[in-house]
Amino acid sequence: MKQLSLKHFIIRSQAIALYRDIMRTLLKIQDQDYRKEMRDWARIEFNRHRTLKDLGEIRTQIALGRRNLNELKLSMQMAS
Amino acid sequence: MLSTTIRLLMRSGTLIRPIITTVRPLSIKPTLINFNEKRKTLINEIPRRWSHVHYTYPMIESRVMLLLRLFDKIDPNSLKLDSKFVQDLGLDSLDIVEITAALEDEFWTEIADVDSDHFLTPRHIIQYLCDKYDIYEHIEAVSAGKEYLEEAKAAADRAHHH
């Protein structure tokens, strides 16, 4: 059984919060094909780094994800 | 007027919208807007939430099960009310986050992280939404209550006959 340290547990909840923000933002996209594509891309990215153990690397990936999400929100604002 | 509000709500491309079960017109306050001196326009198309829709247990159950069946990682044939997401349907925490986001969008409500941690079966989701909308018609009477009622009736009959 994998033991999670407290820091890992906290960072796991941060990653899940990021995924939740991504999903909520994606639901606002009108175009179904574009939404599906972005959702699959988000899933692939999260699953690729699923087995990371180092806290620094995990934080980097979460920051990258946040940056991508902000870019997505900006591009949605421009489009509408 | 009604069709434009329906169009406004449908434009977001989400799954389904609440079914109108009453025929009361939407109670929208008409607002007079003065574009210029010569033309006054009556605008009564302010979009409102479906606050007059009557939520019932069958409606919530069918919407939740439809939403889950349309999720691409769930096999619709093996989906039951009590099928566990993680053990039976093979989902993981990220999928449950996705389902929760879709539920928030469908029911026009916010679902906190702490609440979505407790969603282990579809029944839990339906129960959570019933609690949110104060629906309890599907809950059976507690058996102690039934026995008490029978005893009370028997005592009343005895008092009546004496």
Image (cartoon, coloured by chain):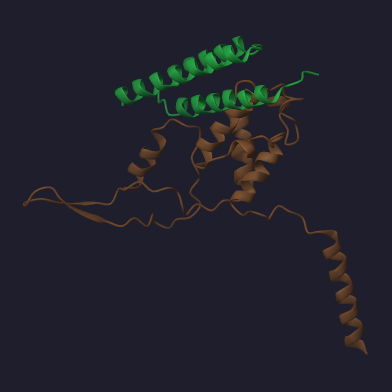
Q: Is residue A40 visible?
A: no
**Residue B35 in the image: above or below residue A15:** below
Q: Quadrant of the C terminus of chain A?
A: top left
Residue most toward the left? B38
Q: Measuring from the top left, give residue B5's x and y in whole percent.
A: 36, 44
Write the residue at 63% across / 20% down. B73
- Taking depth in this image into account, of B45 and B110 the one nearest to the observer is B110
Q: In screen coordinates, is B87 left or right of A46?
A: right
* Left or right side of B51 for B1: left
Please identify which colour was used for chain A in the image: green
Query: Is residue A2 visible from the viewing direction of this image?
Result: yes
Residue A73, placed above or below residue B50: above
Q: Nearer the viewer, residue A30 or B119?
A: B119
> Which residue appears farthest toward the bottom when viewing the image?
B162
- A49 left or right, relative to A79: right
Residue under the point 53% across and 37% down: B104
- Residue at 28% across / 51% down in the picture? B44
What is the display colour for chain B? brown
Looking at the rendering, in which quadrant would you find the N terminus of chain A? top right
Q: Quadrant of residue B32?
A: bottom left
Q: Residue B156: horizontal and vertical position, in percent? A: 87, 81
> In the image, what residue occupies the spot 60% across and 28% down?
B97
Residue B2 in percent (x, y) is at: 35, 47
**Farthest residue toward the top?**
A48
Left or right: B157 in relation to B136: right
Q: Provide residue B113's location: percent of width, then percent of height.
A: 60, 35
Asked if residue B57 is positioned above or below residue A3 in the image, the reply reads below
Establish if B46 lies above or below B68: below
